[in-house]
Each structure stands twice: as structure tokens, then as C-alpha cells.
Amino acid sequence: MSLSRGRSHLATPGPSIIPERVLNAMHRPAPNIYEKEITDITESILSDLAKFASTTGEVVIYIANGHGVWEASLVNLFSRGERIVVISNGVFGLEWASLAQKLQLNVTLLDFGFHKPLNLDNLSELLRNDTSGSVKGVLCVQADTSSSVLNDIKEIKKTISDNGHNAMLIVDSIACFACDRIEMDDWGVDVLLTACQKGLMTPPGLSYCFVGERALAESQKKQNVSPYWDWKPRINPTVFYQRFFGTAPTHHLYGQREALDMILEEGRDNIFQRHEILAKSVWAAVEHWSKEGPITLNVPQEKHRSRSVTTLRADGYDLSELRSWLKNNTGLELGPPLGFAEEKFLHGKSVCRIAHMGHLNPFMIQGIISTIELGLVVCNIPHKAGGSEKASQTIISG
Ligand SMILES: *Cc1c(COP(=O)(O)O)cnc(C)c1O
């Protein structure tokens, strides 16, 4: 018999939990897209997002998923044959590099695997040896959603500057925007990317490029950018429809506006702190389980973990059984593995992910943790009992 009736919880890292308020805001008739309401909502979304990213730069909005802004950032800045460096700590870094290759950019991949952030010495050496300044851009995923590895963006910028190198820094914050801290201008990010379906709590379909001064100037030199992705008319529209190069995504805008209202009500610092506490409580539970048996956090060092998602492993054990038991019997759905194709990870089956991005509170985290623990018992996966108590202690101590 299954007990899974009732409210279910999808803990896959994107799309994240959509608040009722966001859903309700979208539930209305179509507006007239030629009237001021939609123009005003769009402008307010762009300006609130810029504030959240801590930038005085421009914000470009696309009707697209994250892959759309991956492509947009590259076609607006680089031409065929130009050299870029892609830092990778998981599937998303590798996929972004592969997209750049399809655009016929000359990609140097710095691949650090799936368990640790980049080694700054490797980047430094590469840039130091690039005496001709051939590297035009350094691309980095802030938090790779497959591995849950977090990179230190500020240090990457410092490494570029310390080597007297001119490469632009382009950062994918799609998974961790509004979860892990970002200070775009302060940290020296030239282009920042995000999308609406993770920390921004809105159904997939909107994505954003934040464009700093230097990147804007670079892009203005570039002709023949494919018209849909060209950000120049979107940044300086002479008529409103150029913001989207066509019909505005009306209901997504209502949803995103409502989500940003919730974000403003909570406050930026509180949002970062809540994600920190919730992430730490998940880590405390997993670390406790790991004291007896195969379960382990994929990223050993706390400072290298994102607060938006946690990848855990049980090497040699098949967690796909755990995931399907949880889904079919309890209403909890964990994130499937991405990557980890090696035999020792049972081609990914010994890996799963817990999303803790966006609309989440201790009640939900406690539900996730204690329900997983129930699954571990039923599926006979050895672990030290009592993980959810560790999670609560972390919430209390903050
Ligand atoms: C989700 C995600 C993407 C891609 O987003 P899509 O909307 O699926 O195209 C890119 N990068 C990171 C780090 C992500 O988490």
C-alpha cells in the first residue's frame, strides 16, 4: 500500500518549488501587451534583479531557459575562432563548453572533475603563459548543480587581475542566484547569467544576462550578432517590444514580479542566511548518516559546497531504488544523478541530489530529511540513525 496521497515535494534542483503566491499571480486573463502595465512590470523586474545582483550594469531578459543565456552571452561577446577558457566542476560546465565549441569558439577546458572547485594555480599558470592575450573570456559556473560544487568567483577575478590579464569573466549563477551570495560589481564579474526557475521561484521560461560596463562596450564592437540573441536593442529599446523581440511573456512576468516581491519582503541578507542554515542542516544530517555506512557528501569541504543543492553518494549502493521507493510511497521526489558515469558510481545510480533552493523552510527540510531516513531503513542502506535530529539541532543553533 502506498501512503503517498497528500501534498508531494519535488526536491529536484530546478524547477524549484513554486510558491502559491506566484501561481496565483499568474492565474488571470491575458493583459493588453501594448499598455503600460506590462512595460512597468518588466522595468521593475529588471531593476530589482540588478539590485539583487549588486550591479549598476544592464539587465537583459530573454524568453528562454538557461541554455538560452549561455548562448546569448557568447554570441554577443565572441567571434568564431576566438579563445575562451571554461572552468568545469560538473555537467553544466562541460555542457557550456560544448555549446561554445558548437559556436566554433576555441575552447580551452579546465576540468576539475565533480568533487572540488577549480585550482586557482592552474588558471593562473594558463593566463601567465598567455603572453599574447589570446584568451578573451573566462567562463565559470558558480555552483554546478550536478556536483553541488561552489566556486569562489571573487578569487577567480583576482587571479585574472593578478596576472595582468584582460580576459572577461562570465559567470553562470543559474542554480544559485538568490541562494549563494553574489556581488557582481564588487567581485568584478563582467557578465552574470541566471534564470527564473531556481532561486527565483518562477516556472521555467525567463532568463537573464547582467551586463557590466566593459562587456557592454565589447559587445558594441560586434556586428552581425544573430538578431534574436543580440542584446543591444534589448538594452536600449526604442519601442517596448524590442525588450523581448516580440510578444512579452505576460504570465511569466506576473509570476516573476510576485516572486521578487516575496524576495524584497524577506530581504537579501535574510535570504542568504536562510539558505545557509537550511543547507547546513541537510549537511549535518548526511554527515551523521555517513558515520556508519556508505553515504557521503559529494563535496568534502564545507566551504566548497553550494547552499542551493546537495549531491550525496553511496558508492556501491543503488540509490535509484531509494528514489523510486520514496516517490511511490511517500510523495518525496529526490533529484536524479547527472554525470557520475563511472563504474564506481554505478553509472550514476549511487548518486542523488537534494534541492534546497528558493521557497523552503525548516518544516520542509525536516520532512525531506526524515523521509529520506525512512527510505534508508526500508531500502537497507546502512547509515547511522538520527540524521533528522542533527538537522534540527543545526536549525536551532543557526
Ligand atoms: C539549471 C542550470 C542551467 C541550465 O538551465 P536550463 O534552464 O535547463 O537550460 C545551467 N547552469 C546551471 C548551473 C544550472 O543549474
Image (tube, rainbow, N blue to C red):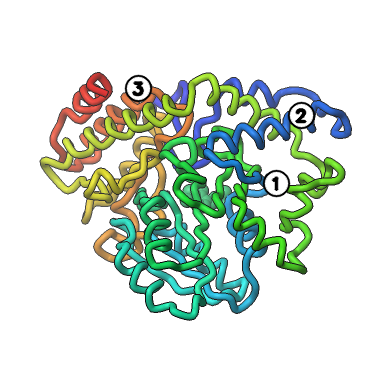
Q: Are marks 2 and 1 in contact (CB under 8 Å)?
A: no
Marks 2 and 1, the one that precedes in the sequence:
2
Q: Looking at numbered disc 2 in the image, what kind of residue is underneath it?
A: Asp
Marks 1 and 3, the one that precedes in the sequence:
1
Q: Mark 2 sits on what residue?
A: 40
Q: Nearer the viewer, residue 5 or 334?
A: 334
Residue ID at (45%, 58%): 140
Examine the rendered structure and indicate whether residue 48 appears above or below residue 122.
above
Q: CA distance from mark 2 to mark 1?
A: 17 Å
Could you say which quadrant of the image residue 302 lies in?
top left
What kind of element bears circle 3?
A: helix
Marks 3 and 2, the one that precedes in the sequence:
2
What kind of element bears circle 1?
A: strand
Residue ID at (66%, 59%): 217
Q: Looking at numbered disc 3 in the image, what kind of residue is underneath it?
A: Pro
Residue 103 shown left or right of residue 35 in the figure: left
Q: Look at the image and tell me in which quarter the C terminus lies.
A: top left
Picture coordinates of residue 391, whole percent (x, y): 24, 27
Q: Looking at numbered disc 1 in the image, what kind of residue is underneath it?
A: Ile
Q: Nearer the viewer, mark 2 or mark 1?
A: 2
Q: Mark 3 sits on what residue?
A: 362
Q: Nearer the viewer, mark 3 or mark 2?
A: 2
Give the crowd class for mark 2: few <14, some 14-19, many >=20 residues within 10 Å. few
What kind of element bears circle 2?
A: helix
Picture coordinates of residue 266, whole percent (x, y): 49, 21
Give me the disc on residue 63. 1
Q: CA distance from mark 3 to mark 2?
A: 35 Å
Residue 313 shown left or right of residue 11 in the figure: left
Residue ID at (65%, 28%): 257
